[in-house]
Image (tube, rainbow, N blue to C red):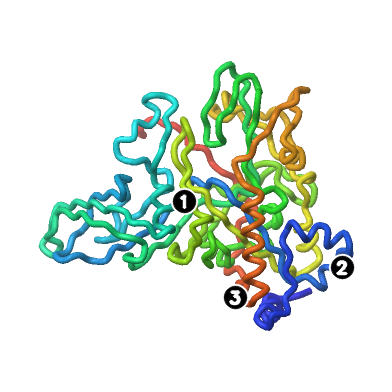
Amino acid sequence: MKTYEQINQRIESGRAVVLTADEIIDYVDRKGLDAAAAEVDVVTTATFGAMCSSGCFLNFGHATPRIRISEAWIDDVLVYSGVAAVDVFLGATQLRHNDPANMAYPGDFEFGGGHVIEKLVAGKALQLFALSYGTDEYPRRELRTWFTIHDLNQASMVNPRNCYQNYNVAINTSSRRLHTYLGQLEPEMANCTYSSAGQLSPLLNDPFYETIGIGTAIWLAGARGHVYAEGTQHSPTCLRGADGVPREGAGTLALTADMKKMRPEFVRGVSMRGYGVSLALGIAIPIPILNRDILRRTTVRDRDIRAPIVDYSRDYPQRTGKSLGEASYEDLRRGEIRVQGRAVRVSSLSSYHKALECAERLKDEIARGDFVLSQPLQPLPREQSCRPLQIREEPR
């Protein structure tokens, strides 16, 4: 048994033994579970992929004369201004003004909120155009200026839902091509797609949220951040397999960090043809090895993780709850699975290579003593389901 205090002391003294979730599997095979649990202090987990439920709060500071922003656009992308005078919120999936979207299906969605966030983190110049109705203390009614992230007082990424614990494999049984947030799906089950780092993914290495909770320190695109809440649609009451590994969506995390400290290579705007825009992020989360059971769960392998195969032509949009079977991440990463007796080619919308780079970066920071762990202030819920939206008539 170890404590957070003991592990942090080892980190600060430069004596911590840190391995990635990719490395720990073979390490435990060689050393044995008990010996490895005594030696290893931290296992780093990570993921890299599109995370639509992301965004940021920005504070511009006050112009002369002052303005209380009521409407605003950054590089022609609408931001939400229903907060204080010069605070705005930019969502990753917001489209650029006058984007034709899917009016001429499928739309290209070349630029949106995720691309603005990418430009911000990269230190590029962006244009702010703001309007106001004018007040006695905020008399300015219009403002147009150029700025970079260095001109802002604060640029805080605040993401309501990241790091899905598991997710669907998308397939298309219809006779027409589909354009989805999981990519292009060809007719008659000609291909399928998925998005997860599998055995490297944070919540798959901590299936019961024993170490990842509210207040947990994280590595968000190179910046030290933390889990500030359960993620939206957090649904841990789910079908689980061996050692509690979810066989469907399950848990999610709400994350925040300072954008001024992020690395541009781990923050990328994404255009999804026929669907919209998004933001790809690199996220790494440390798991303290407090005991042998926590260590054992970090040795989960792709072959042990199964995801539901869902028809996005009918079962997903109509919420039927049906699946066409399951696939292991071992088979998904090989590039081919079998569905109803047929071989189907597979592609991934997440990058295992980039996720591993994130895990390695966090491992190096911990090993150097630059990143200490934080004990959760509150655990994530372990029993909870996600409610659907009920369409009702107006009450009388």
Which disc number belongs to residue 34?
A: 2
Tell me if residue 249 comes above or below residue 169 in the rendering: below
- Residue 260 horizontal side relative to residue 245, left or right: left
User: Disc 2 residue type?
Assistant: Asp
Residue 44 in which image quadrant: bottom right
- Residue 155 horizontal side relative to residue 344, left or right: left
Image quarter hosting the N terminus:
bottom right
Q: Position of residue 235 (x, y in %)?
A: 60, 47
Residue occupied by mark 3: 370
Instruction: Name which of mark 3 and mark 1 comes first in the sequence.
Output: 1
Q: CB of mark 2 within 8 Å of CB of mark 3?
A: no
Q: Position of residue 309 (x, y in %)?
A: 68, 32
User: Disc 3 residue type?
Assistant: Asp
Q: Nearer the viewer, mark 2 or mark 3?
A: 3
Q: CB of mark 1 within 8 Å of CB of mark 2?
A: no
Residue at image coords 52%, 29%: 179
- Residue 22 horizontal side relative to residue 125, left or right: right
Q: Secondary structure at mark 3?
A: loop
**How far apart are the two marked residues, 2 and 3, measured between alpha carbons?**
28 Å
Q: Position of residue 228 (x, y in %)?
A: 51, 62
Which disc number belongs to residue 54?
A: 1
Instruction: Name which of mark 1 and mark 2 comes first in the sequence.
Output: 2
- Most extreme residue toward the top is 175
